[in-house]
Image: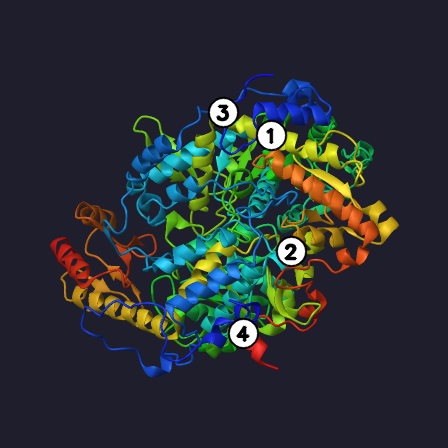
Amino acid sequence: MNNKNKRKLLMDRSIPGKVGATFPALDIPEQKLPDKSQLREDLAMPEVSENEIVRYFSSISQMNFSIDHNFYPLGSCTMKYNPKLNDDIASFPGFNDIHPLQDTSTTQGALELMYDLQNLLAEITGMAGTSLSPMAGAEAELAGMLMIRSYHLNNEDFKRKKVIIPDSAHGTNPASAVMAGFEVISIPTDENGNTDIDALKSVVDDTTAGLMLTQPSTIGLFDTNIIEVVKIINENGGLIYGDGANLNAILGKVKPGEIGFDVVHSNLHKTFTQPHGGGGPGAGAVMVSQRLVDFLPDPIVTKEEKSSIFNLSQPIKSIGKMGTFHGNFGALVRAYAYIRTLGKDGINAISEDAVINANYIRAKLQDTLDLPYDRICSHEVVFSAKSIKEKYGVNALDMAKRLIDYDIHPPTMYFPLIVDEAFLVEPTETESKETLDEFIDVMKTIVKEAESNPELLHNAPHNTPNKRLNEAMAARSPKLSWRDTKAN
Amino acid sequence: MTNHYQSTYTPNTPAIKEEMLKEIGVKSYKELFVDIPEKFRFPELDLPAPTSELDLKNEMSKLANKNSIPGEYSSFLGAGAYRHFIPSVVKQLTSRSEFMTSYTPYQPEVSQGTLQAHFEFQSMVCELTGMEAANAGMYDGATSTAEAVLMACRINKKFKVNIVDGVSPFYIDVIKTLTQATGIEIITQDLNTALNASEESTACYVIQQPNFSGEIEDINKLNELSKKNDALLIVISEPMFLSMYKTPNNYGADIVVGESQPFGVSLTYGGPYAGLFACKKKYLRQLPGRIVGETVDSENVKGYVLTLQTREQHIKRDRATSNICTSVGLIALMSTVYMALQGKVGLKYLSELCYHKAHYAANKISTLDGYEILNNNFFKEFTLKCGTDVNKLNSYLHENKVIGGYNTSDESNNTMLLSFTEMNSKEEIDRLVTLLSKVN
């Protein structure tokens, strides 16, 4: 399908009388329909044949980059290979077709899987309890912050209204803290990439509810001040929230619970390979220390020891339900299958190889790009294009767009916000040295191009269905539906 | 160097890794973890041994088969999640790795497939709900509703939320969880009480159509009241219902939310599903979640981008409209492909088919001694008053390979909510009626 034809929306392909499916016969006597005044006559849905629909979606899909086709070193997103067997297992009828409101006596297999997964995640993170009900990382963050809130309220400690968050944190951290009713206090990161201890000491007091900390941080560094940070917060009566977005880096290398974290969430779609699906579904498990287990979101799966019967239970001081049912079960099946496939040795190998891969890129590109934090990194490495911008007038965005011409998905750009012209590269453990070498060569080539032919980068990408898109126009006069496109 | 387990998902062999470590300038991978305090470094990990694909599939298959599976059992369970037929094309297309293994379309030039599909979804949700604007999807129906409540309070800067009886108890639970720290006051009352109490401090009214008991209520008066009180009207609805009945914009809805699951998404024990979220255009700047807009590129070629991103957490941080960071893209895609396949004719036909099945069943059951249909006006789901304990009744049905209705006895003694779709054949329905007739 040529590009112009690909861009034609379904409603613009619609021809009255075409159908895309077959319809089951009415096998019962027709019943009296409601009065016409209740019914609609205006359902404008496409009329397109099945074959045309298949070709349309297949064709537009090919305008995407994806893990299965491209190296995708998108920092902080852990774009690792998604094992196919997990999808097969999740589609077993006994998992795929069961109804969330079936009596629990008829879903013991599903509950057993959830129970085991709760325990596996608690073991991996060193925590005392798990709820699998949050439907994404950000929802798990909110659950965690609501638990911290409930914990203080339950202690009749009503003045703890502030949450401290380093300026390198993901945007969801402050947004979740605000939804949980807290005021956000932002603190800087020191020149080595650690939490600024003096800054922390200057803001912490008896109004501090807790600290949200990503470990390793969004600049791909494990905070060498961690013990002191935990001590300062705990001494002031606060709790520690560990954003597990970067859990991939520390699997089997350190357990956040042992350091003294009270909550850790895991983005199961990142570390435990639920396919990212063009932006979801995700799944967020939330793990807590002993003092928070009674506050976990509803439900958790419990086991009656004598009978080995599994139940959906509400913890006694639960913050409540996070979604209509019991969480994104399909993602839980995949996470479980993944952990079981790898086992102890494989889980250990993830962090080892992810960190080797990131450090390999760091070592090989440190003379090509600026390295704002010149130390051993974790699973991702942050570079800066600041010098290149100053020398050649080419910025991180231009370089990212040029990478596309080499069939590589750009790294995360302009995040973390504390690094100028940031380029956050997370290769993950599933990439071979050969792929990394290719990426390294391409980056070096692009820097040469920046010097010799900056226009090539300013106008990149060159071989995509669209050149750079006018985002300002999209926001100024929003066209958000097929009907909007017909309005003028 | 120790010989490490070589998994298929970590392609670098020990020899290759050794070479890489040399380039990095360290002797062992252990040196890469020195930033972790020594006391806590390399803890013992108590996990099972690795499992082969063959062994794992066998084990998981056994585990899956411990569950009673709708399809092997006749099922009349609904209450917010519905078993509808899913054409093969839905799974085939949404399993394409270009859709499945890509991420959030932050780089629009290499994400036009996802962006265009999201745009189709938004277009279809607008048509389905009769609203002017829709986002690309939320976590599920309950979280969509909670976000609608938060949005309404932001828009008119009031903090009282009036939830009319008949809203799913699961949804109310989630609204309470997500608003517990916001200072928002949640009131639940029946429609008549709501209508007789004129509350100017009300930020929004929330009503479900059809309601949790299956009843289709007249919303016109509530709309008049909400306009009088300068409150927003939030209507929770269901896509199959919306395919047949007048849309909520006809009775003044400001925000329409719901669950996309009935359209092409398997039950999967409750998720992942996708939440529908549509509203009037004048509220666009307060809409939570991802929104895709049409634009042009530097050569004036049409294309799509994520737009109005200044509402979102990655830009606005603690001042964002929501903390949400997903659109549940793949699930929304399932519903998009489903709607494309069924089309204008199919959606109307299927919704009517559900209607006929439910009314056929209701007419038959209402002739049985000891049973009473409690609804006056319903679509594909109704509440049945039984002469006996519903748990006992459902156990009996289960013994006979039937998954009965959702037990609503907490709300009203000895009642269950029965749901009917095109998946329930005449034979199944007749058999249900016969079984019910034996227990009364």
* Residue under label 4: A482
Q: Which of the two discs, 2 and 3, sits closer to the camera?
A: 2
Q: Amino acid at mark 3?
A: Lys
Measure the alpha-carbon separation of dots 2 and 3.
Answer: 36 Å
Looking at the image, which is closer to me, B394 or B262? B262
The answer to whether A33 appears left or right of A251 in the picture is left
Residues at marks 2 and 3, common chain? no
Chain under label 3?
A: A
Extreme-front residue of the structure: A452
Chain under label 1?
A: A
**Residue B23, position as x, y percentages in the image:** 71, 27
- Which label was assigned to residue A420? none
SS for callout 4: helix
**Residue B248, position as x, y percentages in the image:** 46, 74
Measure the alpha-carbon separation of dots 4 and 3.
Answer: 50 Å
Name the image colouring.
Answer: rainbow
SS for callout 1: helix
Measure the alpha-carbon separation of dots 3 and 1.
Answer: 14 Å
Q: Amino acid at mark 2?
A: Gln
Q: Amino acid at mark 1?
A: Asp
The answer to whether B238 appears left or right of B198 in the picture is left
Residues at marks 3 and 1, common chain? yes
Write the residue at 24% across / 51% down. B390
Q: Contact, CB < 8 Å: mark 2 with mark 3?
A: no
SS for callout 3: helix
SS for callout 2: loop
* Residue under label 1: A353
* Residue under label 3: A344
Q: Amino acid at mark 4?
A: Trp
